[in-house]
Image (cartoon, rainbow, N blue to C red):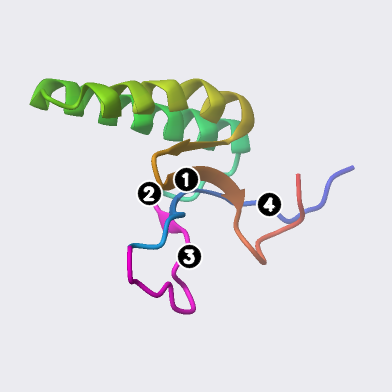
């Protein structure tokens, strides 16, 4: 039988490259929440993969972003399968919120 506490999942993005001459500082790679908290990792992955696909659609409408559109579209499948994907220097992840319930 599972724990009575619920695990909360977050859809986040993380800047993984340090800008030239820049200093990350203490929280330079801290995740930035992209959406609401989720109570199911699969739903969080689906939400984030839809976010990446919608970003690709938006860039496609803007025009002149073919490489970036392809990168975002290529990130959708790994996100749905594994819960993480990268586009350039930005990494997108679904992760458990620290201190919230027991791992599922």
Q: Which residue is located at x 47 percent, y 59 percent?
A: 31
Circles 3, 4 touching at the beta carbon (< 8 Å): no
Q: Which residue is mark 2?
A: 34
Q: Which residue is mark 3?
A: 30
Circles 1, 2 touching at the beta carbon (< 8 Å): no
Q: Nearer the viewer, residue 30 or 103?
A: 30
Q: Which residue is mark 4?
A: 6
Mark 1: give few (<14), some (14-19) or many (20+) Cα within 10 Å: some
At mark 4, the secondary structure is: loop
Q: Nearer the viewer, residue 7 or 23?
A: 23
Quadrant location of the C terminus in the rendered image? top right
Residue 29 falls within the magenta-colored stretch: yes
Q: Which residue is located at x 44 percent, y 32 percent?
A: 47
Disc 2 versus disc 4: distance between alpha carbons?
20 Å
At mark 1, the secondary structure is: strand
Disc 3 versus disc 4: distance between alpha carbons?
23 Å
In the image, 77: left or right of 73? right
Quadrant location of the N terminus in the rendered image? top right
Q: Which residue is located at x 36 percent, y 31 percent?
A: 52
At mark 3, the secondary structure is: loop
Region in magenta: 20-35
Q: Which residue is located at x 61 percent, y 38 percent?
A: 41
Residue 36 falls within the magenta-colored stretch: no
Mark 3 or mark 4: whose residue is earlier in sequence: 4
Q: Which residue is mark 1?
A: 91
In the image, 71: left or right of 44? left
Select label 2 or label 4 by which is in front: 2
């Amino acid at each position: 039988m599972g724990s009575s506490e619920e695990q909360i999942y977050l859809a986040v993005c993380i800047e993984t490259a340090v800008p030239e001459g820049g200093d990350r500082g203490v929280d330079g790679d801290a995740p930035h929440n992209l959406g609401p908290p989720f109570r199911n990792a699969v739903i969080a992955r689906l939400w984030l993969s839809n976010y990446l696909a919608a970003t690709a659609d938006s860039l496609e409408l803007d025009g002149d972003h073919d490489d970036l559109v392809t990168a975002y579209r290529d990130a959708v499948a790994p996100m749905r399968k594994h819960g993480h994907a990268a586009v350039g220097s930005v990494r997108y992840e679904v992760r458990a919120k620290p201190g919230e319930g027991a791992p599922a």
